[in-house]
Each structure stands twice: as C-alpha cells, then as structure tokens.
Amino acid sequence: MDQATETLKRKQLGRWIGIGVSVAAALALLVVIFQTNRNPRTDDASVVANYIEIAPEVSGRLIQLAVKDNAFVKKGDLLFIIDPRPYEYALQQALSDQEALEQQIIDAKRRIAAQQSAVQAATAAVSQSKTGIQTAGSSVDVAKAAVTRAQAAVQAAEAQLKLATNNLHRIEPLLQKQYVTVEQVDQANTAVQVAQGNYNEAQASLAQAQAQQTQTVLRQQEADTMAAEAQAKLGQAIHTVDTVDTLMSQRPAKASKVEAARLDLERTRVLSPFDAYVTNMNISEGAYARPGAPIFTLIDTRTWYVIANYRESKLKNVRVGTPVDVFLMGHPDRRFSGVVESIGYGVFPEEGRVTGGLPQIGRTLNWVHLSTRFPVRIRVEDPDPALFRIGATAVTVVR
C-alpha cells in the first residue's frame, strides 16, 4: 500500500513538474515574443561604408605609388604622383604668354602716348594755321583798302594833270597875241609837269598797292593750304591713335590659362581626401594614367553603417533616432552602439510586372505569405575601423 501511494505521488509530482515546465516554456515564449516585438532584431544585416574610386584628373605616367593595397591612409597622405614635367612646361609657357601680353600692353601704352602727343601737336598746328588765316584775311582787307586809296589818288592826279594840261593849252596861243605873259605860260607848264609827276607817283603807288594785294592774297591762300594740311595731319593723328582695349580683353584668358596650367600641375600629386583604407589596387608604377579611369578605391573610415533588413511587421517599433545594439558575426563578443538614421521606403516587388502596358497578376495564390523586408540604415557611433569591413555580416537589436 505504501509503495502504491509513493508511486502515485511520484506520478502526480511528475505531472505537476510537466505542467510547470510547460507553463514556464509558454511564459518564456510569450516573453520572447513580447521582447521580439518590442525590441526587433535581425541577423539579415551587413556592414557598409561610403567609398570612392580614385581616378586621376590628368593623364600621364605614374612615377610613384605611395600606398599599397589594403593599407590605411590618413587625410592628406600622398597616394600617387603622375609625371609633372609636361604640366610644368605648360605652366611656364602660360606664364610666358601672360608676361608677353603685359609687355605688349606697356608698349601699346607708350605708343599711344606718343600718338596722343602727335595729336596735340597737330591740334596746335591747326590752331596756329587758323590764326594765320585770320591774319592773312586782315592783310588782304588792308591791301584792298590801300589799292582803293591808290586808285582814288591816281584818279585825282589824272584830273589835276588834265586840268593843268588844258590850262597850258589854253594860254599858249595867247602868248603870241601877248594876252598872257611868258611867266604865266611857264607857270602853267610847271603845273603840268607837277601834275604829271603826281600822276606818275599815284600810278606807282597804285601798282605797289596792287602788288601788295596780290602778295597778301597769295599769303592767304598759303595759310588756307597750311590749315588744310594741318587739319589733315590732325585727322591722320587721331585715326592712328590705338587703344589697349583689345589687349586688355586678353588678360582674363591668359590668367585663366595660367590658373588651369597650375591646377593641372597640382593634380599630378593626388592626396587622400579623408582617412580611408585602400582597396582594389591592381596597378603598378610606370602605368599610364588616364583621366576618369579608376586606379583603386578608398573606403571612408570616418563613418560606418549597418544595413539591416527588417520585416515590415517589425517596422512599427523602428523609428529614426532609435538606439540599436550592433554585433559583428566575426566578433560577437563586442557590442557596438548605433542609431537608426533612415528607413527604406521602397523595394522592388516580386510581382506586379507590366506586360504590354497592362499589369500581370499571377493565377496562383500562396498559402503562406512572406513579409517583405525593408532596409534600415543604422549609423554606428563607436566603430572600430580595425574590425569593420564592407560586407561583413552583423546582428542588430533595436532598443
């Protein structure tokens, strides 16, 4: 009887233990489900980082490779050098062309100064010739007045001569009849001679005045000719005055060529733009580099990310700024802190293709629907560059 009772108790204890284990397992499952929903996690995650392909901006022979594949470089470290000699020559040529232009500008300014002096001299000559024209004109007027006075004097002398001659002719016949005396005849004859002298003198004065008038007219014509010549020289001087505008307009182009040549020379030395790892290097010194052709890749070690693919049903507890624990599969003992930086808004759907302009919908219906995964970008706040590698598998837990 005691043995049966003990066996019954053992069975009851076993049942209670089984019930307790089942209840504990159910509770643990509920806790796991709750924690999983509250703090979603995924092992479908990989490490990523920004990277750039280093390509030269100028062409030339590689004369120095200062880095090796998978080496770590700091910002400003020398990566490689392209033969700078052609670009040094180009810079010297550009500087020489710029200096030659400046010398041309200086020479042009000197020439223009001389031409402007010629213009001023021609202007002065024109002014002087105008004064000469005015003086000659005044002299012509004076000569005309003198001719007019001389003509009047000739006319007066001619009248006196006629009068004296007529008197002589009237009294000469009267001498024979002794109506007049010899003295009166001599006086009349003397009057004729005096009138003749005055007439001849008036004629000479008239000829002299006419000669002076002719001379002043010639001087006026000469002054007009000199004025026309001076005006022509002034116009020619003004026409030949150059400007430096054309040469000055070439300055920006020459300066641009110098700066471009200097920039090309600087581009022969390529430096690291940030702290990075060198990867995918498959080139040696002596190779010919071409602009835009990548030589190797630099992985930016300043910022590391983890791209975690979370099921759409878990995204309700994932928000931008949410803290995340990050574990690397290669180093599961290290926990890194991260923060959600962004959540993807689109992935390529498996169905819903368009054929012939119409959506193509499959005829089959799956009994089990798999939830879509969306990428979540997590920025690692305390990365260890020695452990993080692009493509490494990671596990993320949202806190």
Image (cartoon, rainbow, N blue to C red):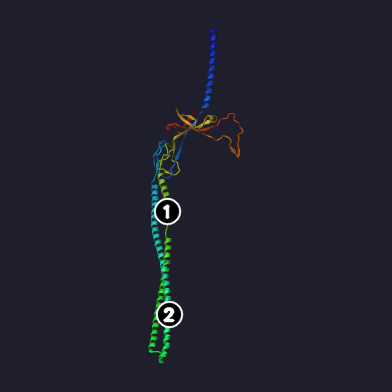
| Residue 143 position by quadrant | bottom left
Q: Residue 145 carries which label?
A: none
Residue 190's x, y, as percent?
38, 85
Where 250 falls versus 22 (above or below)? below
Specify the farthest residue to the top.
1
Query: As shown in the figure, which amino acid type bears the numbered disc 1?
Result: Met
Q: Is residue 198 visible?
A: yes
The reply to whether dot 1 and dot 2 touch (C-beta < 8 Å) is no
Horizontal arrangement in the rendering, residue 98 relative to residue 16 (left or right): left
Between 125 and 133, the one lying in front of the other is: 133
Please provide percent x and percent y for residue 307. 49, 33
Placement of 179 over or under 268, stated as above or below: below
Tell me the amino acid under the disc marked 2: Ala
Give the SS element for disc 1: helix
Which of the labelled discs sits on residue 248, or is there none?
1
Instruction: Using the image as rendered, state which of residue 276 and residue 132 is in the foreground.
Output: 132
Looking at the image, is 67 positioned above or below residue 153?
above
Q: Name the residue carrying label 2.
A: 156
Q: Is residue 331 visible?
A: no
Q: Where is residue 246 in the image (x, y as percent from the top left)?
A: 43, 55
Q: Closer to us: mark 1 or mark 2? A: 2
The residue depicted at 40 percent of the width and 61 percent of the height is 120
Q: Nearer the viewer, residue 89 or 177?
A: 177
Q: Is residue 47 above or below residue 56?
A: above
Q: Going from the N terminus, do you reach mark 1 or mark 2 first?
A: 2
Q: Which image quadrant: the N terminus?
A: top right
